[in-house]
């Protein structure tokens, strides 16, 4: 396979680069760079997504008939790498890359017409209601109940670790519609629920990297006699497990190398500025060797991404190979964050987060890069857990990729 980009691809890369430069405001970039988890205010995310929508680029993975960008696989790759390299706000995946492919494949014509245009235009913010207290890796053991009440389901139970539920207008949930004996996967259904429904409570879960405001990330969502119209059921009752697994392939199959290269370049800059008392860290042969090893691993991942993404056409999912990207990508993210933490040295010690909270008048300790590195390191522990832990990904690869 030829992994070199064509002249058209290079021209496309230049076009994307120029558009980002002209469109992405410096103040927003500064806010992204100060955020320990990459999240900024809801309105900033929505503003950026609407800009991409205006340009026709918000949905690189959607088929053109639904308003997708119509990129070739290499354009898709270049586009995502350029966004990562410019450190643009994260495109929220819950609508665009998670529930939308499920609605396209399994939703009714009415559901497609109702939900897809608003997802494309970022008019509606979605969140993911899969995990429950006691049901994470063993997701099929989930207990949230949806009882058939004729024209609606009555939902009771709770979802946990729900990312940015506080911003969400809608939540897609796995619920138990039948508790028949047999495989726990049977009797699970896929429901779309309006977050304004009476009976829903959002309880924030405060984590180590939480700033006083602006970076609240995960929540518990409680459902107490919540009425959900029957029209909000995706596909067939009891087939939710099939739809849930289809969604997860999209959640996991992202390219990581562009962001990793940018993050490693930042570590190099810190190591050139910081020392350990005996000289610059950048001149330390042990540190240099670890940077070089990490760079080699990122290049290997980049080639794997090009190989996998190059075999796909618009709207296709990548199946179990998405577990390869998720596992290696997140392992390398953590490796780079560890190097960054080491590079900032003593600046990792102060709890600096309040100093860069919105509206704070506290003076941050040390240079700019010192403030966000330790919170980002702590926040980054999540990446090998969410979207299915890396241990679970290894089980999937062993079974479905290696056939063991
Ligand atoms: C920051 C963050 C955001 C998240 N956002 C969302 C969200 O928006 N929506 C949502 O639904 N969920 C979300 N999650 C939940 C996430 O999907 C679960 O945390 C994850 O699936 C692991 O489940 P658990 O936390 O219950 O851990 P457990 O399943 O209890 O696992 C504990 C440990 O045991 C290991 N383990 C478990 N089973 C096996 C096995 N069979 N083989 C080998 N090892 C195993 C796991 O790898 C892990 O190390 C989020 C999680 C985090 C941390």
Image: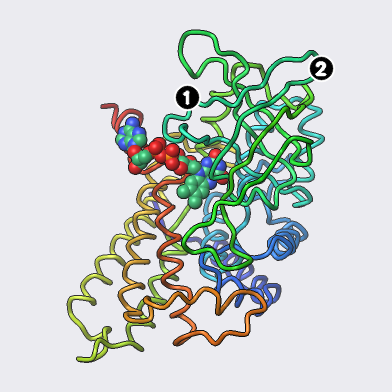
- The residue wearing badge 2 is 151
Residue closer to the observer: 398 or 125: 125
* Quadrant in which residue 66 is drawn: top right
Instruction: Answer left or right for 142 relative to 301.
Output: right
Quadrant of the displayed image that contains ligand 1: top left
Instruction: Answer left or right for 345 relative to 176.
Output: left
Query: In whole angstroms, how far apart are the C-alphas of marks 2 and 1?
Result: 26 Å
Q: Is residue 393 visible?
A: no
Residue sitting at x 42%, y 77%: 266
Q: Position of residue 318 (x, y in %)?
A: 48, 38
> In the rendered view, how is the structure colored?
rainbow
Q: Position of residue 376 (x, y in %)?
A: 45, 66
Residue sitting at x 26%, y 89%: 280
Q: Position of residue 337 (x, y in %)?
A: 37, 66
Instruction: Answer left or right for 234 relative to 37.
Output: right
Residue closer to the observer: 146 or 113: 146
- In the structure shown, which secondary structural element does the residue marked by tag 2 occupy? loop
Q: Is residue 260 visible?
A: yes
Q: Residues within 10 Å of mark 2 (few under 14, many from 20)?
A: few
Q: Position of residue 272 (x, y in %)?
A: 33, 87
Q: Is residue 161 above or below residue 363?
A: above
- The residue wearing badge 1 is 141
- Mark with earlier residue (2, 1): 1
Residue sitting at x 30%, y 74%: 342
Q: Quadrant of the C terminus?
A: top left
Residue closer to the observer: 342 or 332: 342
């Amino acid at each position: 396979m030829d992994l070199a980009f064509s002249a058209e691809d290079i021209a496309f890369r230049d076009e994307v680069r120029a558009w980002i430069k002209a469109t992405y405001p410096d103040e927003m970039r500064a806010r992204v760079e100060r955020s320990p988890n990459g999240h900024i205010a809801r309105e900033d995310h929505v503003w950026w997504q609407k800009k991409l929508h205006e340009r026709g680029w918000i949905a690189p993975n959607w088929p053109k008939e639904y308003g997708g960008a119509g990129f070739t696989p290499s354009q898709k790759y270049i586009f995502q790498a350029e966004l990562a390299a410019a450190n643009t706000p994260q495109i929220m995946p819950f609508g665009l890359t998670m529930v939308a492919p499920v609605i396209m494949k399994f939703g009714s014509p009415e559901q497609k017409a109702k939900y897809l245009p608003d997802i494309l235009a970022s008019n509606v913010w979605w969140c993911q209601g899969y995990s429950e207290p006691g049901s994470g890796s063993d997701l099929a053991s989930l207990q949230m109940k949806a009882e058939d009440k004729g024209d609606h389901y009555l939902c009771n139970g709770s979802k946990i670790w729900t990312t940015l539920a506080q911003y969400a207008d809608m939540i897609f949930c796995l619920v138990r519609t039948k508790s028949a004996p047999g495989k726990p996967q049977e009797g699970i259904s896929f429901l779309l629920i309006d977050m304004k429904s009476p009976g829903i409570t959002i309880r924030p879960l405060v984590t180590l990297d939480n700033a006083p405001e602006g970076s609240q990330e995960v929540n518990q969502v409680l459902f107490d006699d919540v009425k959900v119209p029957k029209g909000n059921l995706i596909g067939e009752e009891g087939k939710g497990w099939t739809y849930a697994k289809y969604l997860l392939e999209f959640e996991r199959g992202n390219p990581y190398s562009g962001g990793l290269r940018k993050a490693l370049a930042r570590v190099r800059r810190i190591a050139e500025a910081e020392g350990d008392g005996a000289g610059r860290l950048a001149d330390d042969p042990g540190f240099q060797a670890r940077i070089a090893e990490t760079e080699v691993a990122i290049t290997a991942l980049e080639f794997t991404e090009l190989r996998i993404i190059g075999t796909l056409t618009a709207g296709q999912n990548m199946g179990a190979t998405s577990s390869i990207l998720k596992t290696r990508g997140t392992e390398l993210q953590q490796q780079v964050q560890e190097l960054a933490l080491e590079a900032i040295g003593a600046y990792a010690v102060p709890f600096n987060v309040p100093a860069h909270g919105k509206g704070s008048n506290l003076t941050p300790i040390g240079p700019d890069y010192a403030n966000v590195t330790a919170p980002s390191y702590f926040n980054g522990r999540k990446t090998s857990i969410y979207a299915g832990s890396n241990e679970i990904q290894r089980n999937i690869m062993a079974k479905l990729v290696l056939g063991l």
